[in-house]
Image (cartoon, rainbow, N blue to C red):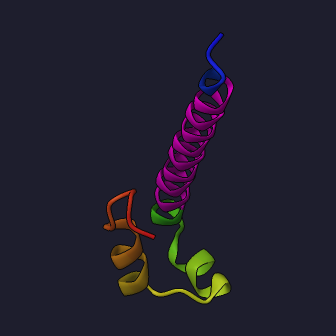
Amino acid sequence: MNIQQPRQSGKITAMASRILDTIHVWQARIEERRELSRLDGRMLRDAGFDWAEVRREAGKPFWRA
């Protein structure tokens, strides 16, 4: 009987969980930036943004916060 197996399994599970969490964060960023880029000028002003900020944020790669 190998006593290391449960510990190793826990590490793999934790790593898989972190990977899935990261993928979810990336997907949320993609969706949020897509939505932001679709706002019209009035909506941007209401939210306190300007076009330069939107272009800068929407142009970021999904892995960058």
The image shows residue 49 at horizontal and vertical percentages of 53, 86
The foreground one among 52 and 7 is 7
How many labels sit on residues?
0
Please tell me whether residue 10 belongs to the stretch shown in magenta.
yes
**Quadrant of the frame with the N terminus:** top right
Q: Residue at x 62, y 39 (%)?
A: 17
Furthest residue in direction top, as rendered:
1
Residue 46 vs 17, above or below: the answer is below
The foreground one among 20 and 46 is 20
- 5 sits left or right of 57 in the view: right
Please tell me whether residue 54 belongs to the stretch shown in magenta.
no
Furthest residue in direction front, as rendered:
1
- 50 sits left or right of 3 in the view: left
Q: Quadrant of residue 55?
A: bottom left
Q: Residue at x 51, y 78 (%)?
A: 41
The image shows residue 19 at horizontal and vertical percentages of 51, 41
- 17 sits left or right of 63 in the view: right
Q: Which residues are magenta?
A: 6-35
Q: Quadrant of residue 62?
A: bottom left
The foreground one among 16 and 65 is 16
Q: Residue at x 41, y 74 (%)?
A: 57
Q: Main secondary structure of the magenta part?
A: helix
Q: Residue at x 61, y 89 (%)?
A: 48
The image shows residue 44 at horizontal and vertical percentages of 56, 79
